[in-house]
Amino acid sequence: MTVGRLEALHLLNANGEQLNEPLVYSRDSYFLGALFLFLEIVVGTSIVAIIKYFSSDVSLFIVLMFRYLFCLPILLIIGLKIGGTHYFKIKNKKVMSLRSVAGLLGLSFWYLSVIHLDISKALALSQVMPIFICMLSILFLGEKVGFFRWSAILVGLSGAVIIINPDAEGWYSVGLLYIFLGTLFASIMFVALRRLGMTENAVATAFWYNLFGSIIFSTYCISALTLNDISIEIWIMLFIIGVMASAQQIFMALSHTYASASSLAPVHYTTIPIGVLIGLLVFNEKIDLNFLIGSFFIVGSTLFILYREKKKPSS
């Protein structure tokens, strides 16, 4: 899921005008957009794999601190280059606060879910986020949803149940609670981003969100944890995660510069086979029939929801 993936969906120009269409119109532009999005997915999936691999060696709070800190310089440089200090002003501070808190909780629970679940299962279950967003849009944005989209929501949720497989012995894991909370808060963040997209620019919202995360986790780590016992290997890992997190946001912003978010939606589902590949090769995970059937239901239902969303403006 990567919460960073949502930060670039509302691109604006230097004057603060929202860009609903890609900047470049050509046959090759979609290829570039899809390529950058695929690179973002590979980098994001690699980050969670690294976090899972080193989860027993370093506190997740320390990882999150460096993840947020290393994202700030690139966002600051980009914002200053585009519009100077005025580019970072936020008009809707209440929604910005909601976006920051929901984004922080969403990312934290997402990383926790990957630590406690098979990475392939966590990545597959995270794809129900469009379903959560659709449901939250009904509650908070007053959007009307017809029979077909309600049916798609039920199909997608049933796919998640199939993957979880409550009939299996030892099916429950605390990671399931974390993935539910992570997806829920990430969806709330996305709904907040929809509101912010009407008045704010993406660089400013991403900067203040990452600054908020840096302050929260730095304060906790400095006061409650010690950094003296961290090995050189872990320091290298933390630096790599920080650099990769910055690259992840750049790739996402570039992908939506060359192609629209709706046209790139199918590319997001490459997350599932990438997660399966990492799970098999790195963590010796097993893929069963329930996983395949449930993933098919989730992908099919969310693609249908996106299809209905695309048709809605024209109707």
Image (spheres, rainbow, N blue to C red):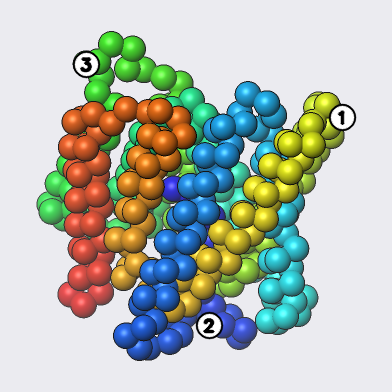
Does residue 157 sit above or below 161 in this rendering? below
Left or right position of 162 against 275? left
Q: Residues within 10 Å of mark 1 (few under 14, many from 20)?
A: few
Pointer 2 local density, CA inside 10 Å: few below 14, some 14–19, many at least 20: some
Q: Nearer the viewer, mark 1 or mark 2?
A: 1
- The residue tagged 3 is 167
Does the residue at mark 2 contact the one at mark 3 (Cβ under 8 Å)? no
Say whether disc 2 or disc 3 marks the residue closer to the N-terminus. Answer: 2
Find numbered disc 1 in the image and state the secondary structure of the residue it sits on. Answer: loop
Residue 54, how many percent across, how many down?
A: 62, 31
Please report whichever mark, 1 or 2, sits nearer to the chain's N-terminal start. 2
Quadrant placement of the C terminus: bottom left
Name the residue: 52% across, 54% down.
43
- Label 3: few (<14), some (14–19) or many (≥20) C-alpha neighbours in 10 Å: few
Badge 3 element: loop
Side of 312 where 100 appears, left or right: right
The residue sitting at 79% across, 31% down in the picture is: 231
- Looking at this view, is 243 or 162 the one in front? 243
Nearest to the eye among marks 3 and 1: give it.
1
Whole-angstrom CA distance, mark 1 to mark 2, is 47 Å
Question: What residue would you read off at disc 2?
Answer: 17
Residue at mark 1? 228
Q: Is residue 14 above or below residue 215?
A: below
Q: Residue at x 32, y 85 (%)?
A: 27
